[in-house]
Every structure is written in structure tokens, then in C-alpha cells.
Amino acid sequence: MKLGLELEYWVVDDSGALVGADELLDIHEAVVPELIDPMIEIQLPPADGLTELRQNLITILETVLARASDLDKHLVPLATPLTEHQFPITSDRGKLLQRIYGDEIKYAKNCAGTHIHFDKGSVVDQLNLLTALDPAIALVSSSPYYDGVLMGMDARALSYRTHSTELLTRYRDLWPYAKTTEEWDERLAQMYETLKLQAEQLDIPEVEFTHFIQQEDVVLTPVRLREETPTVEWRAPDVALPSQILQFVSDISMLMSLTEEKSVNIGTPGIRLEEIGIPPFGELRAITATAMNDGLSERVCQYLAAMRFDINQYEPLAEEIAGEYRLSVADARKIRLEYANRLREDVETLLY
């Protein structure tokens, strides 16, 4: 199974303040801009397994971090900027989305995540298993703060999925299990037409809408089907330290490989001889809510253990960072620099 990986990072200066990332964009073809200036995305090429993926990630991060050091800049592996920021959107696609979403675009632009791509196999089983693994976000949650307020153990997921109108929530939140790929495609087509109608009501020309938004990327949900890649994409996890992400990808890819030989069935959660059991969707939503708010609670740990995760392999950054209800700008800058240093140390450790 080929694996793809995309990682989003904040860029800060020596004071810990968020700054523009333009000077980092030409250092490697894998580095691309994001919706706002202080964030970059590293897009790894498809890899034939974990060993190649690991080597690609280390090589690219080494290159980017060396250039950042020359510029007195740093990469921060945290899911939110911690405190409130009003950075303008820079991309044309982003500006179009802002016209459609309005102020609620901030919940998308102020979040840094991890996107994992898997080769298509038994697609419905893959979609449903990734949906059922949603509570695993607690293993790599990396920011409890959003706009300077302690939200929960996964502030990115909470703000991204729940802080919007009912209409827009459908474009960002977890979808129910799929019965067929045709059903999934029909859902996607309906979402596309709904957003297109919304754009028409805002006097956005159809040619402009269709140029920047295609049906397959109209939603920003945790699980997506990609036709052009072609892959099943999982967008649920936060960005975190590279070693944490690699451990996470290892565990998730092992589970995904089981869909080649086991069916995925709704019932009692767990990995059994001939099936992978996943909970009813309502029960799953409740476990995910606990994961977002409380992190690795007893309920979440019991569920993840049933899905064969070794909880002891993970130390979420959000648990280290969580403190007072409100976070000052000065403290946020210190935290960013601390985890920028942790990122460099982590990459150096991975070299040996």
C-alpha cells in the first residue's frame, strides 16, 4: 500500500511571533503555501511503505529547517497558533472560499493538521474504518488552546468542526458510514451543488466557482475520497512531532492493511479473525466528542485499545501544554519556540 503524507507547520521568528513563510517556499518542491502567510505545507511524494516515507520526511525537513535557521525562522508543530490572529488569506481559492464562508473561514485557516493518503483498495471498508478511527486524534493532539482560550484537548478539531453554522458544519464534520461508493459520490454531488447555489446567491460567477472548486475537494471533512490521486485521504489528526506522526501512520496503515483480508462491520468494536468491528455511528460520535474535549480519557483509551493501539506509545503535546484557562500572547510565543526546538531535536533523533 502506497502512503502519502502532508504536514502543515506554523512559521515563527526568534521571538516566537508568527511571520510570513515566503522565503521558505522555494527551498524544496514539496513545500507549498497554505491559506495564510505564516503557514506552510510539506507534501511528501507517495512512498512504497513506511521506511521510504520516513526517509523522505527526514530529508525534506532537514532541508527546510536548515533554510529556516539561516533566516532566523522556525517551524512549529502545533495544531493552532494558540492565540488569536487575523491573517489575511493569500490564495485565490482561499479568497473565494472566504466570500462563500464569510468570517467562519477563520476556523479553517487557523488550523494545522496532518493528511494521510492511502491507496484505494476495499474503498467502502477503508472509508468506514477511517471514520471509526476518528477518536484516535487524541493520540497526537497538539494544542488545547484556540484564540487564547483553553477549549479542550483538541482545540483544532473542536473549532474546525463545531464552531460554524449548520450549513457549513456539514462541509467540515465527520460523515456517517458509507454503504457504497455510489452513495458517497451522491452525497458529495449534493454538497457540491449546495455550495454552488450558495455561491450563485453571492453573485459569484459559475466559471470562477468551477475553476477553483471541484466536486472531490468541495468538502473539508476528516475523511475524503480523491479521484485524481487516487487515494482515500484522512485529514482528522493534528500536526505533531515527526516521530509521533510516523508512529501514528505506522499504526493506522497496519489497520488499513487489514481491510484487504477482513470485512468492516458495525457492531462490537475490535479486531477479530474475519472482521473489524466498528461502533454504531452515534456511539462513535460520543467517543470522538470525549476525545476532543478530554483527550485520552478512560473511555477513549478502552476504545483505542480494542482497535489495537498501544496507548503507552503516545504522549500528546496537548497534555503538556494545557494550563490556565487563558493564555497570554507572551506565553504563547514561549510555547511556540519551545516546540520549534522540540521539532529540531526530534528530527535529529530520527537521523540515528
Image (cartoon, rainbow, N blue to C red):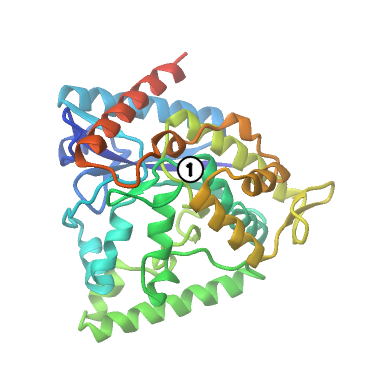
User: Residue 154 at what x, y percent from top left?
Assistant: 44, 49
User: Residue 82 at what x, y percent from top left?
Assistant: 29, 45
Which residue is at 48% across, 43% downward? 4
Q: Residues within 10 Å of mark 1 (few under 14, many from 20)?
A: many
Say if 38 sits above or below 221 in the image: above
Q: Which residue is mark 1?
A: 4
Say if 190 sits above or below 278 in the image: below
Q: Is residue 110 left or right of residue 142?
A: left
Which residue is at 42% across, 30% downward? 57
Judged from this view, the residue extending furthest toward the front is 324
Judged from this view, the residue extending furthest toward the right is 273
Does residue 286 appear anywhere in the picture? yes
Q: Is residue 269 left or right of residue 60?
A: right
State the image quarter where residue 198 is shown. bottom left
121 and 253: which one is in front?
253
Which residue is at 39% across, 52% downward? 151
Identify the amino acid type marked 1: Gly
70 and 312: which one is in front?
312
Judged from this view, the residue extending furthest toward the top is 352
State the image quarter where residue 277 is shown. bottom right
319 and 249: which one is in front?
319
User: Residue 302 at what x, y percent from top left?
Assistant: 69, 45
